[in-house]
Image (cartoon, coloured by chain):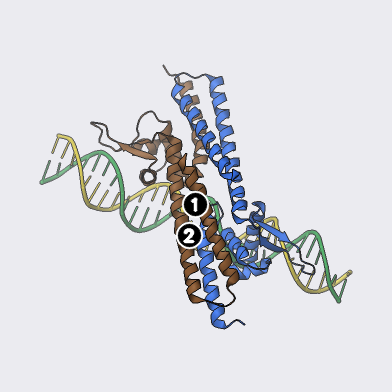
Chain colours: A brown, B blue, C green, D yellow
Amino acid sequence: MQTDENRETLDHFHYQMISEFSKTLEMFSLNTTESQLFVILYLSNQPMTLDDMKNALGKSKTAMSNSIRTLLDYNLVERVWIKGVRKDLYQAEKDLYGKFMKAYVNRWLDAIDRQKSNLKQIENDMKTNQILSSKQTEYKLHEAIKFHNLLEEAFVELNKK
Amino acid sequence: MQTDENRETLDHFHYQMISEFSKTLEMFSLNTTESQLFVILYLSNQPMTLDDMKNALGKSKTAMSNSIRTLLDYNLVERVWIKGVRKDLYQAEKDLYGKFMKAYVNRWLDAIDRQKSNLKQIENDMKTNQILSSKQTEYKLHEAIKFHNLLEEAFVELNKK
DNA sequence: AAGTTTGTACAGTTTGAACTTTACGGACTA
DNA sequence: TAGTCCGTAAAGTTCAAACTGTACAAACTT
């Protein structure tokens, strides 16, 4: 049986966990709500509906709807179906670390790759254009591309484990 | 000698490089101005003053002053002294990749460690408090701490290279 | 078919980060 | 000593991200 005092203390611990844990998740380019939402789902024993989340975080249903779709995009949360329940149900993916790393690292790699391509394009344009006294710039550009390559290598490595 | 046309085309390439390269730097928790500023310094042959930067980016001197101090904090930029020059001069650190990784990874590790400590504190408090039916929460909390440990390991690894 | 319920699109509002302007103390100069 | 220049602190402004409330389409119920 659960006393009121227990309930309160437990809630208090939940608050603290949400508060601290979500700070870490925010470092993975998730915003505050998305992070808190994930922690809430992570701590919950059962899948939750948008209304559950709304009550848990004290924010609008629209905010929940938007954030949950971001989390779905990142593959950090999944929709589950339970017979007889009409509302959509969501739960946090297992394998916290793996999913996070994958989601995060892949987004990074995509972005780095995009910028690297653009820099290479600039490099080509410069060569075609052959401007005087651009040796210094060409060199720096080349260095910048190398920088992107190193970043890519490091992050690919991070994902392998 | 440099023709006007050359000058313009070169500027155009500079713009593009600043635009693209700074996007990558922004992923390292630098804001737009800090990133652009770093690229400007990186591309420059000589050290620059606050006024030079101001002109290069078309923003206020205060903005430059603030951003440059952030970059100094992160050890991505250094102040240099040249005899006879009264204004402060700054230049980008060499070893682009190494400095960046160090700056970035260390900030991350600091943050992760802080949150891990806080979670551990909560864990202790929970054990002391001994609430009924908190087994589930205790387990999740433990998992969250493990998650932080894995993150730390991964990022420490990233820094070793 | 009419009436609910649920999730999301959209428009308007709030809030905080980033920026600018102004002000000022300290360092140099004549 | 008075005057100038430089960097930064402080206060006010701007703008985009995040949030809310409203409206609506689709799915379901009776």
Give coordinates of residue C21: x percent, y percent.
Answer: 63, 68
Give the side of residue B9 with respect to residue B73, left or right: left
Find disc 1 in the rendering and name its residue: A152
In the structure shown, which secondary structural element does the residue marked by tag 2 occupy? helix
The quadrant in which residue B67 appears is bottom right
Say if residue A86 shows up in the picture.
yes
- Mark 1: few/some/many CA within 10 Å (<14, 14-19, 20+): some
The one of B115 and B16 positioned closer to us in this rendering: B16
Three-letter amino acid code at the position of disc 1: Glu
The disc label shown at residue B114, or none = none
Say if residue A62 shows up in the picture.
no
Q: Residue at x 55, y 79 (%)?
A: B6
Would you say the residues marked 2 and 1 are in contact, meaning their CB atoms lie under 8 Å apart? Answer: yes
Find disc 2 in the rendering and name its residue: A116
Three-letter amino acid code at the position of disc 2: Lys
Give the side of residue A71 with respect to residue B66, left or right: left
- Mark 2: few/some/many CA within 10 Å (<14, 14-19, 20+): many
